[in-house]
Amino acid sequence: MTDPVSSLPSRVWAVATSDPSRRVLTCAAAAAQVLLPTVYGPRFNGENAPPNVIQPAPYTFAVWFPIFASSIAYAVHQALGPARNLDISRAVGWPLAGAFAATGIWAPLVRSGKFWSAQGALVTIAVLAGLGRRRIAQAELKGDLTTAEVAAAAPAAGMLAAWGQAACGVNLAAMLVSNDVVPAGPKAASAGAALLVGLGVLGTRAAAMPERTSVSSRFYIGTLLWAFAGVIIGQRGRSRSAVAVAAGATATILTVTARDRLESRSS
């Protein structure tokens, strides 16, 4: 006879990881991702604003509108119709739900002054959204997704993965200076440039990977280029090293992407 007490944890785990739980949690996390930053987001003024090391131009933050819209669209799609129980929904749903939740948690963490915890939330966004993006891209290339499924999942995963990575770099650069880990001035500029190089490597790698032709990868690359353009404009006349590295990364990613297209046409 099965011990009901000893089997309770397994039953709880089975319910928590079931398809209905995933659908509900994804919808709740997508809603939190929109509501918490909007209602309880950080409020900075001249005195408590983070150091501007590689901060992009203000207009680039408009990217959150398509991220929020596509995340809600994905959450609704995976909760309705045939997509509810698809294997790809299971593979992608949990990482994206975690990324959505981390985005929502980030806002109150920053507002309450828990900046290192907020940095951890940004890392979580980048890692989980990146995992979801790669799984979607692989499924796209295998032909496992319909056009509707690609349209529902690819934009949210691609944009959130790229912007999460960019936010990690920008926020970490500011954190290093504000906590006196790196002094302001030339050393801070060098640290910011190094972080931009890292972002450029990630973008170039994505542009050269086999799944580069997938819709999710294109959204990822496009969003990362948007971030680099924002850094170029935001740091123009302020940090030559940041502008140079961001411009170099942009040129490299575009070159790799263009070369791939030329090779595809010639073949």
Image (cartoon, rainbow, N blue to C red):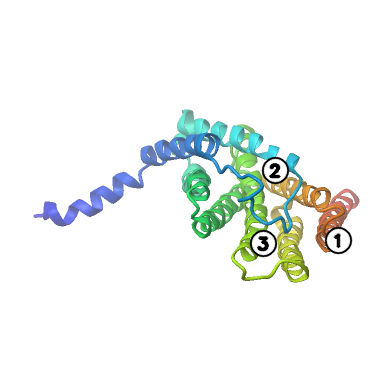
Q: Which of 133 and 226 is in front in this view?
A: 226
- The answer to which image quadrant residue 74 occupies is top right
Residue 240: image tag: 1
- Residue 173 shows which numbered tag? 3
Q: Are marks 1 and 3 in contact (CB under 8 Å)?
A: no
- Confirm or deny contact between disc 2 and disc 3 (CB under 8 A): no
Kind of residue at disc 3: Ala
Q: What element carries label 2?
A: helix
Marks 1/2 in contact by CB < 8 Å: the verdict is no
Vertical comparison of 30 with 190: above or below: above
Where in the figure is residue 87, as x and y percent of width and height? 48, 44
Mark in front: 1 vs 2: 1
Question: Regarding mark 1 in the picture, which secondary structure is present there?
Answer: helix
Q: Quadrant of the N terminus?
A: bottom left
Labelled disc at residue 215: 2
Q: Residue at x 56, y 44 (%)?
A: 42
Give whichever of 176, 8 is nearer the camera. 176
Disc 2 packing (10 Å; few <14; some 14–19; many ≥20):
many
Q: Which circle's residue, 1 or 2, is located before the other in the chain?
A: 2
Residue 23 picture location, percent across and down = 42, 37
Q: How far across and how far down the image is residue 134, in percent? A: 61, 53
**What residue sits 58% from the left and 51% below the top?**
135
